[in-house]
Every structure is written in C-alpha cells, then in structure tokens.
Image (cartoon, grey):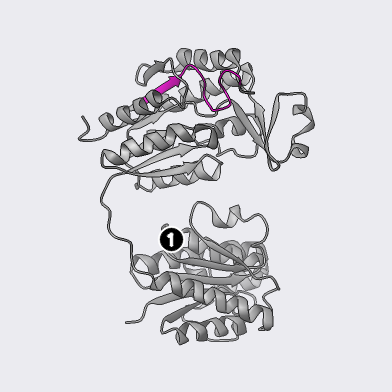
Amino acid sequence: MPKTILLIGTLDTKGREIAFLRNLISARGLRATVMDAGVMKDPSISPDIGAADVAGAAGETLSNLRKTGDRGTALSVMARGAANLAKQLHDNEKIHGVLSIGGSCGTAIGTAAMRELPVGFPKVMVSTMASGQVSSYVGLTDITMMHSVVDIAGINRISRRIFINAVGAICGMIEMPEPTADDRPLVAATMFGVTTPCVERVRARLEKAGFEVLVFHATGAGGRAMEGLIDAGFIAGVADVTTTEWCDQLVGGILGAGETRLEAAGRAGIPQVVSCGALDMVNFGSIDTVPERFRPRKLHEHNPNVTLMRTTPEECTALGEIIARKLNDAKGPTTLILPLRGVSAMDKDGEPFHDIDADAALFDAIRRSVHPSVHLIEMNHHINDPEFADAIADHLITSMPGGD
C-alpha cells in the first residue's frame, strides 16, 4: 500500500496548483489525500476531504461561514478544523506526511494542521510568507518552510520548479527509513555559547550513564521547544544549566521564552537540576538595535548581529526571585546549584561581564526565596569548571528512577 501525503490547500483559489502537486506525488508512487480549506467559492477540483468537512470538524457549517463573509472567522474555523482532521488522520495511521501551499491565510491553515503533528512527522509548507518572521507559523514543531518566491498564482517557470522541489522534499522525507530505535531515557539540557564547556561535559557524563541527551539552545525558541517536549511526555529529566532566557523576558531582550519558562519540569514532576547559566546577560541584535534607554549600560558586541548587555544587581535580584518561585512549585525532585565564581564565560576575572555585586545579588535573592523543598547547593566554582559540570550530571543521575 503506497504511503499517503495529506495535501492541504484552498481549492477555490489554488485548485490548479494543488492538482499539479497531486500529479507529482502520484508520479513518485505515493498517494495524495486532498483537503479543501477554501470557504468563499466552490472548489475548482474535487477534494477527498471537502471544505464542509473541515468546517464541521471545528463545530461550524460552511454555509454559515459563507453567509457571514467574515474572512477572519472563516480562517480561524478552517485552521481549527484542518488541525483536528490532520490529527485524526495521523492517529489512525492514514497519512505519512503533510504538504501545503498558500499565502498568509493558506499558510495559517496549513501550519495549524502541521503543529498538531509530532516532531519527526514530515511537514512541508510552501508559502509566500516564508522569507519573513515565521515563528507564529512554525511554533515549537519541525515544519519545513519553503519560500514560494513568486505568488502562488498559476504554474510558471518559477513556481513549477518550487513545487517540484517541495514534492521531492516531502516524498524524500517519507521514503527515508525510520531511525534505529533508541530506548534510552531522554534528558533535556540548555546551553548558550558561554556555557558550552559545562553542558558538553554534562552531556558526555549523562550519555556514559545511559541517557540520550537533547541539548536546546537557550534562544527563546529553544526553551519553549524544550518545555513543549516536557509537557508532551518525552523527557525523563532536565539539566537546565542555562536559564538566561529569563533575563530577556524580564528586561526586554529579544530571546525571552515566555512567562511559563521553568514550569514544565516541575509540573510534570520529573527530576531537574537547575543552574544560573548566562544570567549575566540580555540579548539584542546589532548594536544599533539596542533601545536608547540601555545605551549607557555595559554593552558587549558579541558579533555584528548580537549585542549583549550586563544585568544589574537590581535585575539579578529579580531574576533570583523568579527562579526560586518557579522551582518552589515543582512536584518532582529539584536541585538548584549555584556557581559562586561566575555564571558564564564572560563572568569571571578579567572578562567584561565580571560583576561581583550583581552575582551576589542573584545568589542572595535565591537563598532568601527558595523553599526547603528545593535542594540548594553552593559551589565555589565557575559554571564552566569541570567539577561544576560533574556535580550537575551526578545529582541528576542520582535523582532519576533507578539512579544511584
């Protein structure tokens, strides 16, 4: 039985293009199940899943949507319906990948369906929006965004090549063999460039102990992705070395991970060992993007596209209180380890962000605010010292089920 690709499009405006994609998929020996997400007009080709079915999956009727003529409401309903149907098809093993095309509305609908599907499930979105900011479309999953270059309006020498590439991409993903099964427990870890020596040593030690380690770059999206996987039940333990995303969330940098960062592991009740990695810095883009109010502050041009700003003692006090408050609510084994000699590669003697007063404010706030339920450990080491990394790994290993 050939594998099946769910092909999503608005057939009132993109029928010719969807038909072209369907034929390309068939030529590869795979099947296409066409879902119509169009509302305002009848489809120009026959779908396998009609627009009425999509609207019905969201608790609405197509006739009502057409009567109101409200494009915003229609978009919301069709996105919800497409997402519900895609999840059903996946859960029933009826589809093996998803391909969608569209402008802003089609992209919103297609990616809503894709976000309901697990990481690793093939997803390709050909979009006029793909050359800009796509975080709202991609979310926390692994959608492949392909820029259409030209508008999705007919088959021409540019769109034809793009569509051929898109079908090649989704078919190639589906045809690739499944990875070898790995039953090692998954551990998540957070890393920044300035905490890399620590996290690399933690990872090596955990892998030697029989764990598979997923390292997340603490760039906002990384923290959100990690917490999403924890909520989804994938993660057995967390080495949250680099909690720097809270600096940006608090102060107004560009790499915040949201107000719920540091909650998922506690909510899930899984073991976590947490530290203060890179709480000495807030992230901005190039130097000219730093807000005027921060220009007198201690700034460091990390590279032409990244400018770092040292956190103040007052900000570090607030950060310590936030971290303690988040960990105090944890339901599972929670250890917080403080590196008293510096929280990043830039926070040590001779480096630009070394600030004894700011670090002291951070650590004092944690000591005052953390509950006895959190195992607080203070080490007279820098965060990148081997002894510090070993302590993180060892405490996590012993707190995992079966650890010793």
The mark total stands at 1
Q: Tell me the residue at 56%/79% (across/down).
A: 164
Q: Which residues are magenta?
A: 335-350
The N terminus - image quarter: bottom left
Q: Is residue 177 visible?
A: yes
Q: Tell me the residue at 21%/29% (across/down).
A: 404
Name the residue tied to disc 1.
Answer: 117
Left or right, residue 268 beside residue 398: right
Residue 84 found in image quarter? bottom left
Between 211 and 247, the residue placed more toward the observer is 211
Q: Tell me the residue at 37%/38% (across/down).
A: 203
Q: Tell me the residue at 46%/81% (across/down).
A: 48
209 within the magenta span: no
On the image, the x and y values in percent for residue 364 come to 51, 12
Determine the secondary structure under disc 1.
Answer: loop
Pointer 1 local density, CA inside 10 Å: few below 14, some 14–19, many at least 20:
many
Left or right, residue 115 beside residue 134: left
